[in-house]
Amino acid sequence: MMKNIALTLSYVGSNYHGWQSQKNAVTVSDTLRTALTKLTGESVTLIGCGRTDAGVHAKIYVANFHSQTSIPMERLPFAVNTLLPFDISVSSANIVSDKFHATYSCTKKEYTYFILPSGIRDPFYINRAYQCHYRLETDKMCQAALHFEGTHDFAAVRSLGTAVKSTVRTIHWCKVHKLENGLIAICIAADGFLYNMARAIAGTLLCVGYGNLLPDDIPKILESCDRELAGPTAPPEGLYLTRLWYEKEVLLGHGVKE
Amino acid sequence: MMKNIALTLSYVGSNYHGWQSQKNAVTVSDTLRTALTKLTGESVTLIGCGRTDAGVHAKIYVANFHSQTSIPMERLPFAVNTLLPFDISVSSANIVSDKFHATYSCTKKEYTYFILPSGIRDPFYINRAYQCHYRLETDKMCQAALHFEGTHDFAAVRSLGTAVKSTVRTIHWCKVHKLENGLIAICIAADGFLYNMARAIAGTLLCVGYGNLLPDDIPKILESCDRELAGPTAPPEGLYLTRLWYEKEVLLGHGVKE
C-alpha cells in the first residue's frame, strides 16, 4: 500500500549546495534521495519544507515522500542513517495523511542567524556562525529588528532569482538575543521567506550593529522596495533553520530558548 | 634581543594527530611551528603545555618559543593566524620571563569530556562530543566521579606508552554536570595527567552510567592499579583541554560554567 511518509532530519550544510536538487552539485535532497532509494528499492521523489542555500544549516527539516516500503517507521531513521554521510541525520519517520505536503502544509518557519563577535577567529565556530570582527551595538539591532515584524512587502530584503506571485509576507517575530556563550542570535519567524530574505535581514541588522544604518531607517527601507537600500546578504554559515510549524501536526524545533 | 614568547591558542583536533610532532603525521605543533617559522624567518622550537591525543580538542592551549622577532606582540596573533589553517587560532602573544616553560610552569590543567546521550546521531556534534546511544544514570556517575578526587596512584586509568617516574597525581576536582543543551560534561582538574588518563576516567564513568560498574567500585579499581578493571579509554572526540593554570600568570580558560 502506498504511504505518505514524513521525515524529520537535521544537517550541517557546509558540504552541500543547499537542499534543492541541482545538476553538477551535491545537495542534501539528492543525498537523502539516494539513501532512500537504496533502502526502499523504489524510485523516491522527495518534497522538502523549503530551499536552503549552499552552506546553510538545518537544526530541523521536514521532507515527505510516497513509498510502499514495509520497513517499520520506528526503524526507518536508523536504517537510512547507515546509508547517509555523518552530516545528515534522520531523527523520525511518520506516516501522515495523503494531503500532507512538506512545503505547502508548513504554516510557519523560524530561521536563526548566529553571529560570533570576536576580534580573533574561533576554530570551533568556523562554518557554524558568522564571525564578526567589528563591534556591534546590539541594543540598536534589537530596536531595528522589531521594525521587520508584521505584514510588509519584503522586496527590499530578498534576492531575485525565484519567481514569486507576491513579495508580501508576515514576520511573526524578529528578535535579537545575546546568548550566554557570547553568540548573538537573530530569530526570525514568518509564514514564508523570500529568496535570501533571512540573510538580507541579518545583513541589514549587522549594518545597524556597525552604525551604518539607524533602527528608524528600517521602515523607509521596507517601503522603498529597493534592495540597494538594505544591507548586504549575510554569509550563509551563520544561518540555521530552527523551527517548523505544520497544520495539526506538532513538530518540535531547536530554537534559541528565551 | 632573544625573547621568550608565550602564545595562547585553541584548536579543533579532528584533523590532527595530536599536539606532539611526529614523523609522517600532521600535528598541531608542526603546523604552528611552520607558520611561526614563515612569520619570523627563524627556526622555531615550540614547547607545548602537554600532549593531546589525535582527535582531542583544545579550547585553550599554551605554547612558548624563543625568538628575536620585532613583530609587536599585539599584532602577532593576527599575523600568524593568516598563515594557519582555520582549525587552529592563536588568540594572544605575550613576552614572559626566561624561566617560563609551557610544560613545567603549568601547575594545574582541566580537561572536560563532553557526552551527548542520544539515540540518533546529531550531525552538529560529529567529532565534537562522544555520542552515546545508551541511557546513562548520571546521578551514579556524579557519585563515582568524587572517588577520583584527591591524591591517588592512577595506574589503573592510564595507558602504557610514555615512561613516567610516578603514577601518583592529585585530582583537584572530578565533577559530572548535566548541561542545558543536553550534553553531559565530565570536568577533571589535576596537577598532571598520565597518558590517556582523562579518557580512561571518562570511560570508567561511562561504565558506571551504563550500570556495568558501581560508584563504590572506583576506590577498589584505583587501589588495584590494574588497567583491566577500569573502563575502556573513551573516544578522543569528546575530550577538550579547557583550562590551564600557571605560576603567577593567570590564564583564563573556557570551562563549563558551574
Image (spheres, coloured by chain):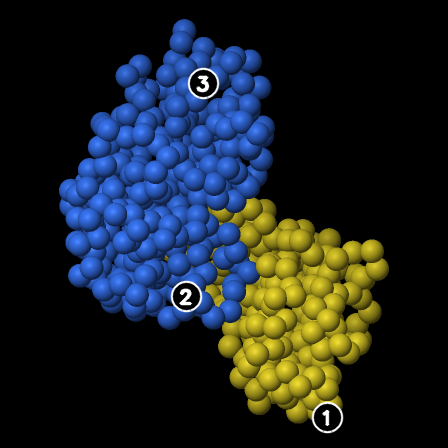
Chain colours: A blue, B yellow
Q: Answer with left or right where residue B58 lies relative to residue B166.
A: left
Instruction: From the viewer's side, name the closer residue of A122 and A210.
Output: A210
Mark 2 → mark 3, Cα distance in angstroms = 41 Å
Badge 2 crowding class, 10 Å Cα cut-off, few under 14, some 14 to 19, many 20 or more, is some
Q: Position of residue A32 (x, y in %)?
A: 51, 28
The tag on residue A117 is 2
Any part of residue A70 in sight: yes
Q: Residue at x 55, y 52 (%)?
A: B128
Q: Answer with left or right where residue B190 lies relative to residue A184.
A: right
Query: Which secondary structure, mark 1?
Result: loop
Q: Position of residue A83 (x, y in %)?
A: 58, 28
Q: Residue at x 48, y 13 (%)?
A: A70
Amino acid type of the residue tagged 3 in the rendering: Thr
Instruction: From the viewer's side, name the closer residue of B249 and A122.
Output: A122
Q: Give the labeled residue for mark 3.
A: A45
**Quick one: quadrant of the N terminus of chain B?**
bottom right
**Image height check: is A169 above or below B178?**
above
Quadrant location of residue A2?
A: top left
Badge 3 crowding class, 10 Å Cα cut-off, few under 14, some 14 to 19, many 20 or more, is some
The tag on residue A163 is none
Q: Residue at x 74, y 68 (%)?
A: B34
Determine if marks 3 and 1 fall on one subunit: no
Amino acid type of the residue tagged 1 in the rendering: Met
Amino acid type of the residue tagged 2 in the rendering: Pro
The tag on residue B1 is 1
Mark 3 → mark 1, Cα distance in angstroms = 69 Å
